[in-house]
Image: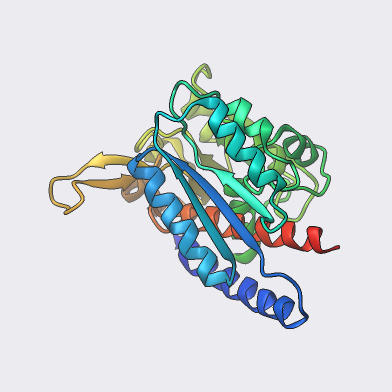
């Protein structure tokens, strides 16, 4: 078993981005600017946004955090999105999800200018990704592709099982893994809550990408020897031994599954850091496009 170290790879990519940004600035070009809208005080969202702001600093980006209380109206939030769409200094921005129940997440996503949609959630970018055209790829799937590439993990012709069908991870991941690319070119099966006999399917997989949000769902008897296992899950599970009162737990029963794998990502320190660095890559791409 070999560990896929997302923390290490993300640090390498951030250093590469920072060097490119300084070269841009030296040429007299504008420093890339990422903005984020955070609604309410959800603990997970607070942590994610803080990590994104920190990553902006490490990459040499300008960053702006716009905060609203969770009683903001949908119309007011949409107005804030419009202002960022129209701001010439902002290259890309995100609206941190989840949003309060009275706000339509889809309506907000569709209100974002696709050219500034560095999360890659707008239908225009989803469509471009699905058809193999250049665009902003959803950050978590993009980060997983980078891990395959950096670790020279051969995916061509392999059977990849994706657990989960969310618009953020499962669906785009399946699309990307079946495309004819270096990190891809797989035969893909997508399993979800209505799929019978999931263990029988996963036991045939060369690659398992677990994105269910169900702690320790993938057990050792669901994985064949030598499989590559990518754990996207990050669920907060109560843990009285920790100061925070919780620990992050993945969708994979790591201790029991890891000995059977050729490669596996840990939680934390696997996919999570790659999600953030992919957002940085998209922001750099957005700045380059706007500079053309």
Instruction: Report whether 180 appears left or right of 268.
Output: right
Residue 144 seen = yes
Where is residue 60 drawn, in percent x and y?
58, 72
Q: Nearer the viewer, residue 70 or 163?
A: 70
Farthest left residue in view: 241
- Look at 86% across and 62% down and name the residue there: 292
Where is residue 77 drawn, in percent x and y?
54, 33
Q: Nearer the viewer, residue 103 or 133?
A: 103
Instruction: Report whether 239 appears left or right of 271.
Output: left
Where is residue 177 drawn, in percent x and y?
69, 43
Instruction: Report whether 113 appears left or right of 12.
Output: right
> How many labels, in total?
0
- Look at 62% across and 26% down and name the residue there: 107
Farthest bottom residue in view: 26
Colour scheme: rainbow
Image: 20 above or below 70: below
Instruction: Report whether 239 appears left or right of 41.
Output: left
Where is residue 187 drawn, in percent x and y?
71, 38
Q: Nearer the viewer, residue 68 or 33?
A: 68
Residue 154 seen = no
- Look at 64% across and 43% down and name the residue there: 83
Give the position of the N terminus as an image quadrant: bottom left
Image: 102 above or below 12: above
Q: Nearer the viewer, residue 42 or 35?
A: 35
Image: 44 above or below 11: above
């Amino acid at each position: 078993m070999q560990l896929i170290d997302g923390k290490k790879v993300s640090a390498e990519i951030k250093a590469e981005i920072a060097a490119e940004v300084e070269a841009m600035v030296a040429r007299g070009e504008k420093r890339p600017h990422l903005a984020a809208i955070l609604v309410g005080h959800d603990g997970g969202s607070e942590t994610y946004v803080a990590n994104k702001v920190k990553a902006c600093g490490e990459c040499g980006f300008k960053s702006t955090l716009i905060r609203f209380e969770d009683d903001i109206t949908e119309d007011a939030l949409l107005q804030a999105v419009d202002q960022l769409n129209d701001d010439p200094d902002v290259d890309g921005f995100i609206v941190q999800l989840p949003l309060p129940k009275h706000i339509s997440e889809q309506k907000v996503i569709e209100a974002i200018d696709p050219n500034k949609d560095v999360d890659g959630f707008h239908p225009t970018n989803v469509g471009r990704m699905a058809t193999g055209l250049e665009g902003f790829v959803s950050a978590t799937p993009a980060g997983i592709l980078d891990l395959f590439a950096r670790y020279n993990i051969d995916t061509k012709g392999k059977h990849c099982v994706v657990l989960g069908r969310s618009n953020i991870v499962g669906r785009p991941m399946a699309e990307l893994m079946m495309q004819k690319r270096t990190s891809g070119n797989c035969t893909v099966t997508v399993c979800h809550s209505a799929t019978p006999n999931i263990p029988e399917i996963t036991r045939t997989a060369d690659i398992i990408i677990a994105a269910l949000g169900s702690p320790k769902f993938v057990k050792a008897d669901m994985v064949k020897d030598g499989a590559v296992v990518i754990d996207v899950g990050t669920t907060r599970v109560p843990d009285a031994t920790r100061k925070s009162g919780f620990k992050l737990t993945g969708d994979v029963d790591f201790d029991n599954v890891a000995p059977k794998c050729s490669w596996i990502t840990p939680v934390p320190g696997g996919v999570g850091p790659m999600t953030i660095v992919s957002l940085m890559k998209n922001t750099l791409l957005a700045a380059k496009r706007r500079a053309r």
